[in-house]
């Protein structure tokens, strides 16, 4: 095949493979069998082997990096990655709502989101290309885990618009993958992970990206780091923009007109939580208007315009091991 034909075919294969990967990993709605994806990926690998100069960083063949690095470098977040204050009951939530009303007046609404129990990460894109990903760390300084985040198939290596944007989300391990991983660990006599959050964090802190690639991780994006530059004025529009750009955004989010609708949402998901294919440890409630978020501001660590309702810790039935005292 001569170079001009190869260049054209590489572009076609990128488009096809990225579309099929998006349908499978982001929309959970594949339109072609895995065998078709694998066939096209092999064709791309073969062309790239013949013409290495045609390999680009966003090629579907470039998900799993080369040799492990010796350590992760540090990354300073351009805007701090805040954590969340907690609410444990209706009274806490009504307190939060009262404070919001004091600052925002009567005309405000909330967005409710499932609180994914994973590892908070930041993804940076330059001109549409994924260039760097980092853990939240202490909120100001995180670890550069780009090579491991590139292995997560639901993270696009190039987004649908050539935006330079920083986005944030929760990387997580689906319940089924967690159970599968722990079965394998137990069969190998290894220590199993205590929960999917630890398994996701442990996988993303591996220095060898081939291990992260084997852990079937996923991600839900839930914030734009620098929304001002996108022109959106409401959090809900920010989430829709993330979806339009090709990111995986949790579909259970809901606009709530008032705190009573928030309480209904919480009641609903307290019941439906066990049926979810991923762990959640609560519900995140956010004032929708970005202008009102600005008015409310943040403390050093947490926003005043958002709160996390935490589910009661499941009463762990601790089998008391009776120690035979002889
Ligand atoms: N875990 C989540 O699903 C989640 C979410 N859906 N939305 C937010 O919005 C926060 C981020 C900064 C201000 C509001 N945070 C989340 O998790 C946070 C990240 C860091 C601590 C919490 O786990």
Image (cartoon, rainbow, N blue to C red):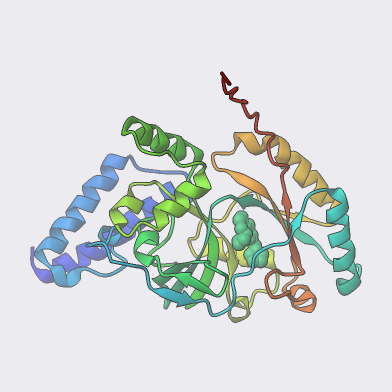
Residue shown at 39%/32% (left/top)? Answer: 183
Q: Is residue 237 visible?
A: no
Q: Quadrant location of the N terminus?
A: bottom left
Whole-percent x and y of residue 201? 46, 54
Figure quarter occupied by ligand 1: bottom right
Q: Quadrant location of the C terminus?
A: top right
The answer to whether 70 is drawn above or below residue 114 in the figure is: below
Identify the image quadrant of residue 67.
bottom left
Front residue of this view, candidates 34 and 261: 261
The answer to whether 196 is drawn above or below residue 64 in the figure is: above
Front residue of this view, candidates 202 and 1: 202
For this view, does 287 lie left or right of residue 152?
A: right
Could you tell me how many numbered marks the image carries? Answer: 0
Residue shown at 64%/47% (left/top)? Answer: 281
Residue shown at 50%/65% (left/top)? Answer: 245
Whole-percent x and y of residue 60? 29, 59
For this view, does 48 lie left or right of residue 69?
A: left
For this view, does 212 lie left or right of residue 222?
A: left
Front residue of this view, candidates 2 and 119: 119
């Amino acid at each position: 095949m001569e170079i001009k034909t190869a260049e054209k075919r590489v572009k076609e294969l990128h488009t096809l493979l990225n579309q099929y990967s998006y349908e499978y990993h982001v929309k959970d709605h594949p339109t072609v069998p895995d065998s078709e994806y694998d066939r096209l990926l092999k064709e791309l690998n073969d062309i790239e082997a013949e013409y290495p100069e045609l390999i680009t960083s966003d090629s579907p063949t470039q998900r799993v990096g080369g040799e492990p690095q010796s350590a992760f470098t540090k990354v300073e977040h351009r805007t701090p990655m805040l954590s969340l204050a907690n609410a444990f009951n209706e009274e806490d939530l009504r307190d939060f709502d009262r404070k919001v009303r004091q600052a925002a007046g009567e005309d405000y609404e909330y967005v409710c989101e499932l609180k994914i129990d994973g590892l908070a990460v930041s993804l940076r894109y330059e001109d549409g290309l994924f260039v760097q990903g980092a853990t939240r760390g202490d909120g100001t300084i995180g670890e550069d885990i780009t090579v491991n985040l590139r292995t997560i198939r639901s993270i696009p290596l190039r987004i649908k618009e050539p935006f330079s944007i920083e986005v944030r989300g929760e990387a997580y391990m689906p319940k089924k993958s967690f159970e599968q991983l722990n079965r394998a660990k137990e069969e190998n006599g290894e220590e199993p992970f205590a929960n999917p959050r630890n398994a996701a964090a442990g996988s993303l802190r591996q220095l060898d990206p081939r291990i992260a690639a084997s852990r079937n991780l996923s991600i839900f994006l839930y914030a734009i780091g620098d929304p001002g530059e996108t022109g959106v004025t409401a959090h809900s529009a920010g989430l829709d923009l993330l979806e339009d750009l090709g990111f995986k955004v949790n579909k259970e989010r809901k606009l709530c007109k008032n705190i009573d609708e928030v309480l209904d949402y919480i009641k609903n998901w307290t019941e439906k939580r066990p049926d979810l294919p991923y762990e959640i440890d609560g519900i995140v409630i956010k004032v929708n208007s970005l202008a009102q978020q600005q008015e409310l501001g943040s403390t050093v660590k947490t926003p005043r315009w958002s709160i996390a309702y935490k589910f009661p810790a499941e009463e762990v039935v601790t089998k008391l091991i009776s120690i035979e005292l002889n």
